[in-house]
Amino acid sequence: MALRPETLPRDPDRLIEMLLASEGKNEALQATIRTLKEMIFGSRSEKLTVVVPEQMALSLGEAQAAPPEPANDERLNEAGAPAGAQKRRKRNIGALPPHLPRHVVVIEPDSMDCPCCAGKLHRIGEAVSEALDRIAPVVRVVRTIRPKYACRACEEVIVQAKAPARLIEGGMVTTAFVSHIAVAKYGWYSTLYRQMQILAGYGVEVDRQTLSRWLKEAARMLKSLYERQLAAMHLHAHLFCDETRMPVLDPGKGRAKTCQLWAHATDDRPWRGPAPPAVAYVFADGRGKKEIAAQLATFSGTLQVDGYSAYKALLKDERAAGAIQLAFCLTHARRKFVAVFKSTKSPFAQEVVERIAAIYAIEKTIRGLDAEQRRAVRQAETKPLMAALKARLDETRDGLSIQSTLTEAINYTLNHWAGLILFLDDGRLEPDTNIVERSIRPIGIGRRNSLFCGDEGGGETWAILSSLINTAKLNEIDPETYLTDVLERIVSGRTKNNQLDELLVWNWKAARRAETMKAAA
């Protein structure tokens, strides 16, 4: 309601209170406008990007007398660290992987006679160069012949070799071909429609429904291994968790419903711990406490998450109350202040980002040390910085309007403070959830390409195959080689259900490495 002179109070204190509230509301509205403009016209990066004056934007009723001041991005990088501390871009200048096969091409001179005196030339050396090459993929037909044999003496017995087991019994494809389709979709984000077109280019006509059935059969065969991987990850005392939406067709309603893929991740490499890099996705109808509580029924330890309410509600669950401790994400807190700075150019928001940058600068120096060494450095160097940051947040919040976007960012940080500082006392923990967020990205890319999965069965297929494929990628092994070998072992019966631990990505990799070393010895 608009303010009118006759409705205004005469009490000066009340007028001051109304003025501050009005300024806070106005600031929040202005921040909303800037945020919307940034979402439409600005960069998607979390960096404090410099606004290009030449780039015009649609006015949403806000004065555009002059372009906004630069956001000083050159001083802050994505982790909040000074730009001078940014990692150098990784460039490969001639160092090609030694494990790749070499095709040797020797180019001799046109003539072996000396161009000066016509004498015979002799070899004195060579110049060697290497270039990455690619042979066009070959789609072939495997023709399997099983001869039949009979005995001339008795003429009653016919002997024939048993047909090898295949994933699609009686189908038109090998197990390796189905693995290729799965990795192309869930590892490299190529939709089934695109793969159908690629196959058509080779003269092979296959519809998407057939490709989808192949993938579902692969997921069915791999489900036990997927469940074993998830159970193995829950045995560790530190787990990351996040969730992302997964649209699923809702038959009869003419639209897609929103389900969820929850990501569970482990990675103890930053402190040389026992947990391997791994991710397991769990498909669920919703993203409430009920879903995450069921998924973590066997987990006990520290769960590192963002500030989503379902995780906090999890602590009220009777089983989880004493078994699970929540560690929150410093990066999520930082994002709040980055958003405030980008919309209001608040000096205090920039100060907070710079303070967090100093914390990450320390983290960079201790990455790779053992847990106790990391804890010692954090206690000596990081703990005073975090205490000083909290003091500044408490001090500044008292003088701000409750409707200010800066107040919202400060409140978020202080409300999660107990979980934000857990990493100070435990060298096994990370200050953020970046490990699981990196594993969520492949799902987002695949979802953007595919738009939705066909049904809930398709959602489970997505979860199973993506878990194994992306875990293979995290362990730096070729996912297609891994998936083909694992499927062939399971389909043929060479690996029984009680031996599935051998096929977990990290165990499979260790066994392959041991075989390679033994062969080289």
Image (cartoon, rainbow, N blue to C red):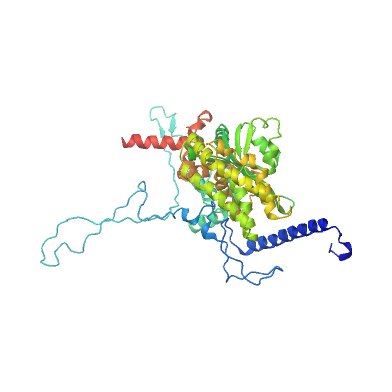
Outermost residue toward the top?
A: 154
Residue at point 45% right, 45% down?
Answer: 478
Q: Position of residue 29 (x, y in %)?
A: 72, 60
Task: Specify the quadrant that holds the C terminus.
Answer: top left
> 160 or 225: which is nearer to us?
225
> Residue at (44%, 38%) from the top-left corner?
509
Vertical order, 402 against 295 (above or below)? below
Pick whichever, 436 or 177, lies toward us: 436
Rendered location of residue 481, percent (x, y)? 45, 43
Q: Can you see residue 516?
A: yes
Tell which of 172 and 246 is nearer to you.
246
Q: Is residue 215 left or right of residue 87?
A: right
The quarter in which the N terminus is drawn is bottom right
Q: Position of residue 484 (x, y in %)?
A: 48, 42
Residue at 65 percent of width and 64 percent of height: 37
Q: Where 456 falls versus 228 (above or below)?
A: below
The number of discs equals 0
Q: Is residue 33 left or right of residue 238?
A: right
Q: Residue furthest front?
A: 12
47 lies above or below 485: below
Residue 497 in the image: x percent, y percent?
Answer: 53, 30
Left or right: where 81 falls relative to 417: left
Which residue is found at the position 52% from the left and 28% from the top? 498
The answer to whether residue 207 shows anywhere in this view is: no
